[in-house]
Image: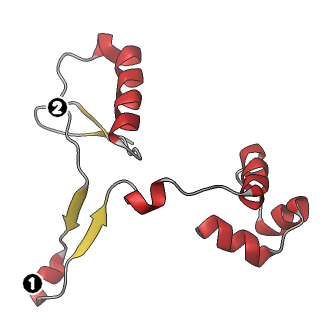
Amino acid sequence: MVGQIRGRWDLAVSILARTNYEFGKILDKFMKRFYSFILEKDVLLTEYSPIYSREYLENTPKKEFVYGIPEDKLNTEIDGTDRRILKELSNNARINIVDLAEKTGLTRDIINYRIKN
């Protein structure tokens, strides 16, 4: 995500990565491509960020946003069913569930469950 900002910096770039290693690879690729346009940079790694809204005035619980993927979700195995779904989605990410079910031979419920998980 790229956003224009005011103040000291002219541009802010956000990178969402699964691991620190993946972040490093993405940042390295970005810097190799755009280094000639960058005079100064600052890197901030964030794993957790509470989100405060006006509800804090009413003493309601704060919302939270966790960046990245929890450790227990990182090494999820992909089975044959997931592979069939992912193969079709890689060809057409905008395919509707009905057409995806027809192409994979799976039910809509199975596809919805697998995509959500």
Quarter of the image for residue 30 reads top left
Question: Where is residue 45 drawn, in percent x and y?
Answer: 23, 43
What is the spatial separation of the Cα atoms under label 2 and label 1, in whole angstroms?
32 Å
User: Extreme top residue here?
Assistant: 36
Q: Residue at x 25, y 17 (%)?
A: 38
Quarter of the image for residue 44 reads top left
Residue that badge 2 annotates: 9
Left or right for 104, reference 60: right
Question: Where is residue 80 drawn, in percent x and y?
Answer: 77, 56
- Label 2 residue SS: loop
Question: Where is residue 56 drawn, in percent x and y?
Answer: 12, 81
Mark 1 crowd level (few <14, some 14–19, many ≥20, 10 Å Cα): few
Amino acid type shown at disc 1? Leu
Question: Where is residue 51 drawn, in percent x and y?
Answer: 22, 68
Tell me which label, 2 or 1, sits earlier in the chain.
2
- Label 1 residue SS: helix
Query: From the image, which quarter does the N terminus lie in?
Result: top left
Quarter of the image for residue 20 reads top left
Amino acid type shown at disc 2? Trp
Which disc is residue 17 wearing?
none
Between 113 and 51, the one lying in front of the other is 113
Left or right for 78, reference 51: right
Q: Measured along the vertical axis of the image, is residue 27 above or below residue 81?
A: above
How many marks are shown on the rendered structure? 2
Residue that badge 1 annotates: 57
Q: Residue at x 41, y 16 (%)?
A: 33
Left or right for 29, reference 49: right
Query: From the image, which quarter does the C terminus lie in?
Result: bottom right
